[in-house]
Image: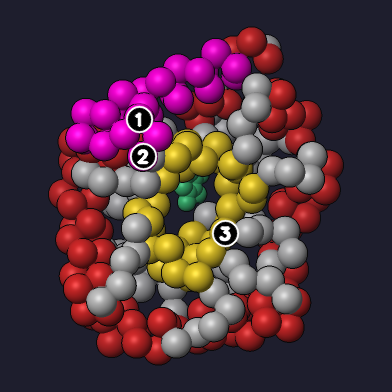
Amino acid sequence: MSSDITANLGRIKQRVADASVRSGRSADAAQLLVVSKTWPAEKVSEVVAAGHLAYGENRVQEGEEKIPRLPDHLHWHLIGHLQRNKVRKALPLFQTIHSIDSLKLARYTSNIAAELGVKPKIYLQVDLAAEETKNGYNPDKLRDDLDDLLSLENVSILGLMCIPPMAATPEDARPWFVKLRELRDELEHRAGQAFPGLSMGMSGDFEVAIEEGSTIVRVGSAIFGSRT
Ligand SMILES: *Cc1c(COP(=O)(O)O)cnc(C)c1O
């Protein structure tokens, strides 16, 4: 029911604002990215009708089908793994990419962006727990690549993103959010430039993530219900 989704959106926005204030920041310090993956355009329209602008998809192909069916003024974020052979399709659709996880992919993305005349915002995805099954930069590799990443002209690096290991409770995720923030601080120090963005926190743990400095939380099921 549409009223459910709209009510969920309102509640989540309030909780995001409350957690931001709790973290000593302004109520709008953390942005809400509504993760619309698996949900059809008609369902997403209900959130659009409530005035929300930022949406996340994890697959380029799903975005290709869905994004043209929704209004032009929305902002689309790619939050899932990006394969090199999808970059050319992804860039006209997504203004922000949360999943850049190698210098090779970053360089290729920057080159294609130059060709297409766009400059996507990117987050560098970090695999903090060195989980075999997860994509993401190894922190040491990221330290090594930092200068080369910063030299890329057609991507704008906002900061870091992580998907922590599955946690039994939201509190269990906190140490990973702290680690991502500390890595960000270290990289800022090394680079002598700010990386203000921390993409961390999902339906189950977004408040903890915001308390630890998240600037954008990626929330799907708490708004749309569980994906089956
Ligand atoms: C699906 C997904 C989310 C949203 O997960 P929920 O638990 O439904 O909020 C966030 N981030 C990424 C990378 C995802 O793939």
Label drawn at residue 96: 3
Q: Which residues are magenta?
A: 5-29
Give the side of residue 183 with respect to residue 35, left or right. Answer: left
- Disc 3 and disc 2: Cα gap in Å? 18 Å
Whether the residue carrying mark 2 lies under 8 Å from ligand 1 is answered with no
- Count neighbours of disc 3 (C-alpha within 10 A) and say few if under 14, some if 14 to 19, many if 20 or more: many
Numbered disc 3: secondary structure = strand
Tell me if residue 9 can be seen.
yes
- Disc 2 and disc 1: Cα gap in Å? 6 Å
Q: Which residue is mark 1?
A: 27
- Considering only order in the chain, which callout, 3 or 1, is on the residue closer to the N terminus? 1
Label drawn at residue 29: 2
Asked whether the residues under the numbered discs 2 and 1 touch, taking CB atoms below 8 Å apart as contact, a structural biologist would say yes
- Count neighbours of disc 1 (C-alpha within 10 A) and say few if under 14, some if 14 to 19, many if 20 or more: some
Indicate the position of residue 152 as horizontal and vertical percent values: 50, 84
The answer to which quarter of the image holds residue 48 is: top right
Circle 3: residue type:
Thr
Residue drawn 25% across the image and 70% down it: 188
- Count neighbours of disc 2 (C-alpha within 10 A) and say few if under 14, some if 14 to 19, many if 20 or more: some
